[in-house]
Amino acid sequence: MEDFRLTERLRLEPVAERHAGDLLALYRDPAVAEWYGEWTREQIEAEVARMAAHWRDDGVHKWMAYERTSGDLVGRGGLSRQRVDGVDRLEVGWVLHRRFWGQGYATEIGRAALSFAFDELGAREVVSFTEVHNLRSRAVMERLGFHYSKEISVGGEPFALYVL
Ligand SMILES: CC(C)(COP(=O)(O)OP(=O)(O)OC[C@H]1O[C@@H](n2cnc3c(N)ncnc32)[C@H](O)[C@@H]1OP(=O)(O)O)[C@@H](O)C(=O)NCCC(=O)NCCS
């Protein structure tokens, strides 16, 4: 494995085409599908290709996260460059397999992403946003020190925007 970074408990790999099977398994976890909807193999292949292209073009995108001790897939998360509320920004997000909730893994991915953004990319701001009723995701933002900014509309739905 040539391109990865380590946190205390996780190995983070930039999403690439070889991760299609793992990403599909993650998005088919019923607790994840509740937020991310149903995905076909073809859609996931297009998604990993899109993410890999962003890594090549922007030098940043999401990581797949694996537990260092077991090698098991924990989830995916990290930064991406996105237009949010009409402004080009760095955003951070996370998705975990249900069996890994409640152990601080999303916070650990978030911390690695913030260090990447502020220490390596020289970012001045990182945002995060989620459905207003996604309280677990909002709690991760708050644990990481984000401040609630305002409600925004994403695809016609109300989302909570946080800024750090
Ligand atoms: C959103 C999501 C990633 C949050 O996962 P999570 O496990 O709640 O968040 P963390 O990994 O930061 O874990 C925090 C919990 O672990 C506990 N914890 C244990 N060890 C910890 C540690 N070392 N550091 C931080 N928290 C720790 C915290 O007390 C907290 O417990 P609580 O939920 O009982 O309050 C998860 O619910 C998910 O994947 N949801 C579906 C996808 C989704 O909605 N993604 C967000 C889209 S914007």
Image (cartoon, rainbow, N blue to C red):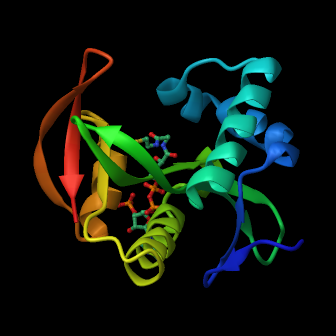
Quarter that holds the N terminus:
bottom right
Compared to residue 160, the image places residue 125 above or below, namely below
Quarter that holds the C terminus:
bottom left
Res 75 seen here: no
Compared to residue 108, the image places residue 140 above or below, namely above
Horizontal side of 113 relative to 146 (left or right) equals right
Horizontal side of 91 relative to 7 (left or right) equals left
Q: Residue furthest front?
A: 57
Compared to residue 15, the image places residue 26 above or below, namely above
Query: To which quarter of the image does residue 58 belong?
Result: bottom right
What residue sits 53% from the left and 55% below the top? Answer: 101
Query: To which quarter of the image does residue 11 belong?
Result: bottom right
The location of residue 29, given as percent across then percent down, is 67, 33
Which quadrant of the frame does ligand 1 lie within? bottom left
Circle count:
0
Query: To which quarter of the image does residue 12 belong?
Result: bottom right
What residue sits 80% from the left and 19% below the top? Answer: 42
What residue sits 76% from the left and 76% below the top? Answer: 68
Horizontal side of 41 relative to 107 (left or right) equals right
Res 109 seen here: yes
Q: Between residue 57 and residue 145, name the one nearer to us.
A: 57
The location of residue 75, given as percent across then percent down, is 64, 52
The location of residue 46, given as percent across then percent down, is 74, 27
Q: Between residue 117 and residue 38, name the one nearer to us.
A: 117
What residue sits 65% from the left and 79% below the top? Answer: 9
